[in-house]
Amino acid sequence: MYNGIGLTTPRGSGTNGFVQRNLSHIPNRPKRDFKDYNEMAPPPPVKKVDKSIAVHDKKREIEIKCIELQDELEEKGEKEDVIVEKVSKLRKKLTEEL
């Protein structure tokens, strides 16, 4: 036994008598002071979306719609010429709306 901690004798205890520090012990910490929200810095401003990125996203949506139409027509068994013509008409119509 050292400093009043541990077994007086390890005989019969099934251990070797080695005393370890409790690493899971959390000491009492001082209470935190809550800050007033008025004193805190304002949140960062919201960034505006770049126009080129918005245009690119709309073009991607157009291409997705064209690919979906192409897949539908291919499943129906349409001829390749008819598919290309209908997809190009749809693409032209959507790009004009853009």
Image (cartoon, rainbow, N blue to C red):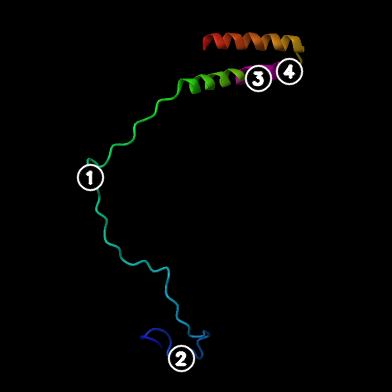
Q: Which disc is residue 36 wearing?
A: 1
Is the C-beta separation of discs 1 and 4 under 8 Å?
no
Three-letter amino acid code of the residue under disc 1 = Asp
Sequence-wise first label, 2 or 1: 2
Q: Callout 3: few (<14), some (14-19), or many (20+) C-alpha neighbours within 10 Å?
A: some
- Residue closest to the eye, 86 or 39: 39
Is the C-beta separation of discs 3 and 1 under 8 Å?
no
- Label 4: which residue? 74
Separation of residues labelled 3 and 2 (CA atoms): 81 Å
Per the picture, the main secondary structure of the magenta-coloured stretch is: helix
Three-letter amino acid code of the residue under disc 3 = Ile
Above or below for 83 versus 42:
above
Residue beneath the point at 58% across and 8% down: 93
Is 3 positioned to the left or the right of 16 in the image?
A: left
Separation of residues labelled 1 and 4 (CA atoms): 64 Å
Residue 88 spot, x, y in % from top left: 65, 10
Q: Callout 4: few (<14), some (14-19), or many (20+) C-alpha neighbours within 10 Å?
A: few
Residue beneath the point at 63% across and 17% down: 66
> Which structural element holds mark 4?
helix
Sequence-wise first label, 3 or 1: 1
- Label 3: which residue? 67
Could you tell me which quadrant the N terminus lies in?
bottom left
Sequence-wise first label, 4 or 2: 2
Sequence-wise first label, 3 or 2: 2
- Label 2: which residue? 9
Residue 84 spot, x, y in % from top left: 71, 11
Q: Callout 1: few (<14), some (14-19), or many (20+) C-alpha neighbours within 10 Å?
A: few
> Which structural element holds mark 3?
helix
Q: Nearer the viewer, mark 2 or mark 1?
A: 1
Separation of residues labelled 4 and 2 (CA atoms): 86 Å
